[in-house]
Amino acid sequence: MTITKGIASPGKFLVQADALVDLAVHGKAFGANAYLICDQFIVGRVHEKAMPGFNNEQRAELAVFGGQCSDSEISRHVEAARGADYVVGIGGGKTLDTAKAAAHFLGKPVLILPTLASTDAPCTAISVIYNDDDTFNRYLFLSKNPDVVLADTRILAEQPPRFFAAGVGDGLATYFEARACFAAQRDNLILGNDGKMLKPTLVGFAIAQTCYETIKKYSTQAAFAVQKKAITAALENTIEATIYMSAVGAESGGCAAAHAIHNGMTNVHDLHGAQHGEKVVFGLFTQLVMEAAPMAEIEEVVDIAIAVGLPLTLEDLGLKHFKETEWRKVAELACDKNDTMHNMPFTVTPDLVYDAIVATDALLHGFKRQKAVH
């Protein structure tokens, strides 16, 4: 059997202050009629900054995202966007995943403008589909990556610090999950033409490594810039890591335990208020515990997480009471045969995951006490 390796990325990734103003300019190459899917909070700004660029030659219809990247929400936009030449997603991860999925089903180009640097959604050819109750449903693999991704540093500098931190959390997992996949030569997240996933490449792994090194070097500085809504070189570098490198590194390098555990954690009601990246970073710590990673390596990640303001323990994430049956279910879901847990370079069972979750939470409580003392 021939093993196919591969890497995927968006057609263009542009980092620009006030990119929203030039939205029509960037979309012109794809046609005259745009269908915009926007988060509610950004609608006013889109009307003010982007819509004046759509003149007599170019037109845009604006639709407000319903709040959940579900099959029903995607279908709604597919029907509404049939007459458009291209689709634009403006907002957070679920909004962007909905825009990508709608464009996929319509066979149309898609432009992405993230308002948060909190997930990998802007750059990947994957949409994460949820049920209407916010539990994880499945990964939808798309025919291609977005045509253009516009990282508007003006908007991203103004994002709430918690969302910026969540993006760092998601990005932190990229290298460690890619490392596990590469060691085992398991699947990445690119669907081949034969319907089988591809294998990770050297360049995908290198991008994942660079993502971690960039976050380690610049994210603390960038977090302070976001607190003051300031555009700095450190912020631009961190945005490149959390939006582009994290996405391409994860898609081409592969995901493993951290994201599988996150997907299981969506079943815990207390954690529905936690951000994707906040849960992913707990999944990352659990993966490192499963791997028996050196304590120095775990502590390095803990220090970054604390510096940018990420929650550590399950209690920090919003858990009120630890129920063994609930968390055994999390472990069982994390080991689903269709998830990415099987990319770990050793056999993983629900019992192993459960024990690692319990041990990880205790370890993180210990780090919190230690860091508080010092």
Image (cartoon, rainbow, N blue to C red):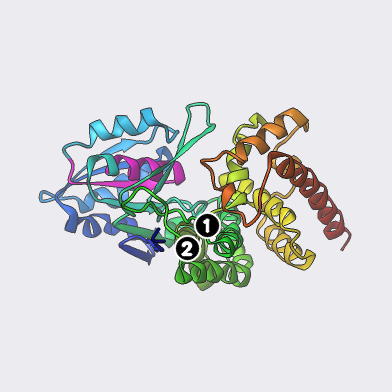
Contact between labelled residues 2 and 1, with CB atoms less than 8 Å apart: yes
Tell me the amino acid under the disc marked 2.
Pro
Q: In this view, does 235 lie above or below 320?
A: below
Q: Magenta residues?
A: 84-103
The x, y position of residue 98, in whole percent, is: 37, 40
Q: How crowded is mark 2: few (under 14 residues within 10 Å), some or many (20 or more)?
A: many
Q: Distance between the residues labelled 1 and 2?
A: 7 Å
Residue placed at 43% from the left, 60% from the top?
154
Residue in front for this viewpoint, 296 or 180: 180
Which residue is under mark 2? 200
The x, y position of residue 322, in whole percent, is: 78, 33
The x, y position of residue 131, in whole percent, is: 48, 29
Residue placed at 45% from the left, 46% from the top?
93
Q: Which residue lies furthest to the right in this view?
A: 373
Examine the rendering and report whether any part of residue 277 can be seen. Answer: no
Examine the rendering and report whether any part of residue 29 can be seen. Answer: yes
Location of the N terminus by quadrant is: bottom left
Disc on the earlier residue, 1 or 2? 1
Q: Which residue lies furthest to the left in this view?
A: 57
Q: In which quarter of the image is residue 147?
A: bottom left
Instruction: Confirm whether the magenta stretch covers residue 322.
Output: no
Which residue is under mark 1? 186
- Per the image, label 2 sits on a secondary structure element best described as loop
Tell me the amino acid under the disc marked 1.
Arg
Residue placed at 62% from the left, 57% from the top?
345
164 sits to left or right of 299: left
